[in-house]
Amino acid sequence: MRIHHPRHTRRGVALVEVILAALILGIGLSVSLSLATTSLKRQGLGEHNLTAAWLADEQMSMVLMEGPQQFLQTHPTSGTFDPPFDEFDYEVEIQHVGDYEPYTVEVYITWDGNDRQFVLDAIIAPRQGELEEFEDRKPLEPIDREAIYYEESID
């Protein structure tokens, strides 16, 4: 009569458990690395989108501050930003229907070889009641910027 030892079957089961655990661990690690890589790419895209939004807002603010007609006369409507934003290109489109009608302004920011794009558009109204000025506005009296930092002593 032969006696069956449970040690031999236990060793076989332990080997299967180790192989199964290694397989599950490998799958888990590969999924984790894939998720980490995807999240890093998305974070980079988010940073570029945020930078593009800031740059578009800057261009739109310049059009608003100077007025659409003055902006067209004094600034280029397309180009590349200065470093450190030299990977971004811009284009400003300004459409005007007629006197006292609002301007349609669109700012396009592109990067990654024009594969990615951010668009900002607005309607900017001209000043009512007066003709649009096409020359630089100068202050009536000179501005002394240093005077705000130094007090004049009264003797």
Image (cartoon, rainbow, N blue to C red):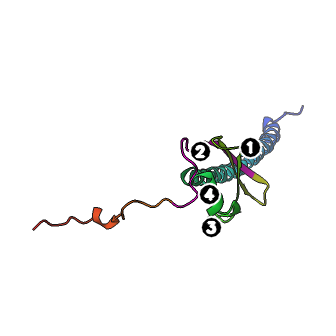
Badge 1 vs badge 4, beta-carbon distance below 8 Å: no
In the picture, the disc for residue 82 is 3
- Check the picture and name the quadrant holding the N terminus: top right
Which of pointers 1 and 4 lies earlier in the amino acid sequence?
Answer: 1
Relative to 28, say whether 91 is above or below.
below
CA gap, disc 3 to disc 4?
A: 18 Å
> Which is closer to the viewer, label 4 or label 2?
2
CA gap, disc 1 to disc 3?
A: 44 Å
Which of pointers 1 and 3 lies earlier in the amino acid sequence?
Answer: 1
CA gap, disc 1 to disc 4?
A: 56 Å
Which of pointers 1 and 2 lies earlier in the amino acid sequence?
Answer: 1
CA gap, disc 3 to disc 2?
A: 30 Å
Q: Which residue is mark 2?
A: 126
Comparing 126 with 151, the one in front is 126
Question: What's the amino acid at mark 4?
Answer: Phe
- Element class at badge 1: helix
Question: What's the amino acid at mark 3?
Answer: Asp
Extreme residue toward the top, this view = 1
Q: Which residue is mark 4?
A: 71
